[in-house]
Image: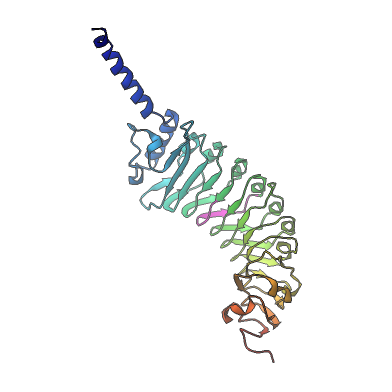
Amino acid sequence: MASNLNLPCLFLFSIFIAISVAELCHQDDKKALLNIKKAFNNPYILTSWDPQTDCCHWYCVKCNRTTHRITSLTIFADDRLSGQIPPYVGDLPFLETLMLHKLPNLTGPIHPNIAKLHNLKFLDLSWNSLSGPIPDFLSTLSNLFVLSLSFNNFNGTIPISLSKLPNLGGLELDRNNLTGEIPDSFGYFTGEQAPSLYLSHNQLSGKIPSSLSRLNFTSIDLSRNKLKGDAFMIFGSNKTVQIVDLSRNQLEFNLSEAVFPQSLTSLDVNHNKVFGGLPPEMTKLNFQYLNVSYNRLCGEIPVGGELQKFDVYEYFHNKCLCGAPLGSCK
């Protein structure tokens, strides 16, 4: 008889356990996510965001296995989602990854509430239709490792404050409408290692800042801008840079005087005003890619290394460059 009296208690306890397991997601995080869904007009990609279910199991989000707080929000590749970045993204305080990527109808500026995400390590807002200036407040995200704003419509100058990001490993600002000069502060990144730097396909002008000589970039792409002057600050025997793309600018320097590091595997300087010749030391480098076409180079292409494996198209349209794979020198 006593055991029968305990059955209702056991039943209620089982319900309590089931509810506890089902509600691992923190209610503040769930509220923020549902507000984000509403702000985007309940798009199909967020159909799984059902308020009756555990938000840790929703599509596009990840929870910490111990704290069950939302640490990742990744919404990408949906041309039906439209609107601006909702302010509610700032209500996910434990977010480490925020990716809003390849959403062609995502418009407007970067919302200032993103500055509240002090745990953010990866911020990817690339391949959207975002516009306006790149905001200074991004420099307050001290844990940021990757900042990708590529393929948008951002304009104005590059904030000098971005160099204050102490853990930045990659800065991708390419394919926007940015103007002005590359900040001199970019030679003073405070981290242990300089970030890979992608500034191509903008309207940047002026000279490459000499302060960049202080740093050791692994990869740097400044192509398709309006940069002038020389690029010696990127090279040097003590550097470990691997990939350099300076193509389609207005750079003018003597390539013969450049000192290339042994680490260099890819060099593109096509469509500039580079003069001089190819230094013989280039035969010692393990080039995977090389393009010096459409410049003002002269002299014989050094024989050896990887230099003869490239096509004529990587060398042609120079002033008087000759030797294989071009025609023989007269």
Q: Is residue 311 visible?
A: yes
- Residue 182 is situated, as x and y percent measured from the top left of the image, at 66, 57
Q: Which residue is drawn at 75% across and 64% down?
A: 237
Nearer to me, 229 or 310: 310
- Residue 159 is situated, as x and y percent measured from the top left of the image, at 63, 49
Nearer to me, 292 or 68: 68
Q: Can residue 87 be seen in this view?
A: no
The magenta segment: 148-159
Q: How many labels were placed on the picture?
A: 0
**Residue 156 falls inside the magenta stretch:** yes
- Residue 11 is situated, as x and y percent measured from the top left of the image, at 28, 18
Q: Is residue 324 above or below residue 110?
A: below
**Residue 120 falls inside the magenta stretch:** no
* Quarter of the image where the N terminus is located: top left
Judge left or right: residue 287 versus residue 98: right
Q: Which residue is drawn at 49% across and 44% down?
A: 98
Outermost residue, bottom direction?
Answer: 330
Judge left or right: residue 179 versus residue 130: right
Q: Residue at x 57, y 61 (%)?
A: 202
- Residue 179 is situated, as x and y percent measured from the top left of the image, at 61, 58
Quarter location, residue 289: bottom right
Nearer to me, 11 or 53: 11
Q: Which colour scheme is used?
A: rainbow
Q: Is residue 194 above or below residue 203?
A: above
* Quarter of the image where the C terminus is located: bottom right
